[in-house]
Image (spheres, grey):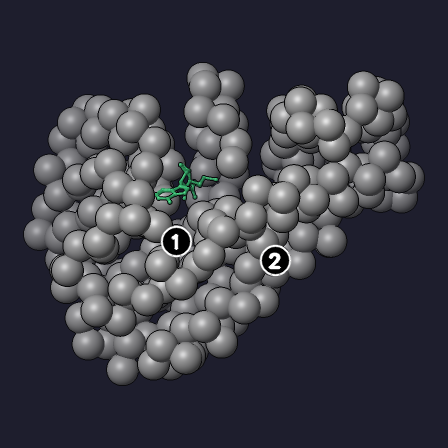
Amino acid sequence: MLGNDAVELDRLRLQHDLWRPFLQAALGRATLSPGERVIDLGAGPGFVALDLARIVGPTGQVLALEQNPAYVRHGQRLAVEADLGQLEMRCHDLLRDPVPAGPFDLVWCRWLAMFLPEVEPLLDPLPHCLARGGRVLFHEYVHWDTFGLHPHGHAMARFSRAVQRSFRQAGGDPDISRRLPSLLAARGFEIEELLPLPVLGRAGEWPARWLEMFVTLYGSRLQALGLWSPEEAEAARLEMAASRADPGSFWVGPTILEVRARRS
Ligand SMILES: C[S@@+](CC[C@H](N)C(=O)[O-])C[C@H]1O[C@@H](n2cnc3c(N)ncnc32)[C@H](O)[C@@H]1O
């Protein structure tokens, strides 16, 4: 799991800003509306929960569950500052604590399932906490191997393999979206949408800013784990510098799959 210091908070804020158009489009496809009740699983510092609370408005409800107390306090502060009484951030371990009964109209989950050593404790309660006709909406990766810096990102290809190894060593599955639709169907959900969200950008464009930041910050983590060396980090830094000088160079992000399913 990524750390929770101020640098990581800044990274999550930037990441949220960059991904906001994808979030809003997904919520539009899911027809999230004023007055609805939403649960946000693994809510991080509360940036998405804030957007959700604005959409459902004062007649709706957002319950954001997060295990990191510092993130919970951050989200609670955001809710007070924005005067969003419909947003509650709660400290909660999704692998241990019982999921609140609801009923909810929408479950939102992004970049959480991929880190969990087992997803069953996350998925099993979903049919019970949703109202009839309620939706689940996941944004998790389906193909981490699309990550790359082209045309010369050899160190970046090795970085990608090290990242995926680190996720698997911690018990996660970087491509968890390959399994989510079947796991949801087995729990009685009707799969409404499977939509890949590819990301590509040249130097200076947002995917490049997002991925360069990830390489720099998560590269340090990989070194601490012994999965990446200072020499590899330097090779990656040189590749990034070279890409900024080549107008034909471009980044591709790991591909997310939007999974939307409905409780019948
Ligand atoms: C990469 S962050 C994503 C945050 C947010 N969903 C977003 O899209 O920005 C993953 C979050 O899941 C939280 N998390 C991981 N395991 C959890 C668990 N068992 N229960 C609750 N939260 C968990 C982490 O603390 C972290 O804040």
Residue bearing mark 2: 175
Amino acid type, callout 1? Cys
In the image, what residue occupies the spot 30% across and 59% down?
A: 107
| Beta carbon of the mark 1 residue lies under 8 A of ligand 1 | yes
Q: With respect to residue 248, does 113 lie above or below?
A: below
- Residue 148: x and y in percent read 77, 45
Is 246 above or below relative to 130? above
Quadrant in which the C terminus appears: bottom left
Q: Nearer the viewer, residue 111 or 186?
A: 186
For mark 1, give the secondary structure: strand
Residue 200 visible in this rendered orientation of the protein: no
Q: Position of residue 182 (x, y in %)?
A: 49, 76
Q: Residues within 10 Å of mark 2 (few under 14, many from 20)?
A: many
Q: Is residue 74 left or right of residue 214?
A: left
Mark 2 CB in 8 Å range of ligand 1?
A: no
Report the residue at 63% width, 44% height from top: 169
Q: Residue at x 51, y 47 (%)?
A: 115
Camera sees residue 223: yes
Q: Mark 1 — residue? A: 109
Task: Name which residue type carries label 2.
Answer: Asp
Query: Splitting the image into 4 quarters, where does residue 232 fall?
Result: top right
Q: Answer few, some or many: residues within 10 Å of disc 1's Cα (few below 14, many 20 plus, some between 14 and 19).
A: some
Q: Which quarter of the frame holds ligand 1?
A: top left
Residues 197 and 2: in front is 2
Q: Residue 159: horizontal and vertical position, in percent?
A: 77, 37
Distance from the alpha carbon under mark 1 to that under mark 2 = 15 Å
Q: Is residue 155 above or below residue 255?
A: above
* Residue 252 horizontal side relative to residue 231, left or right: left
Give the mark, 1 or 2, whose residue is nearer the N terminus.
1
Q: x and y percent of residue 91 in the render? A: 24, 36
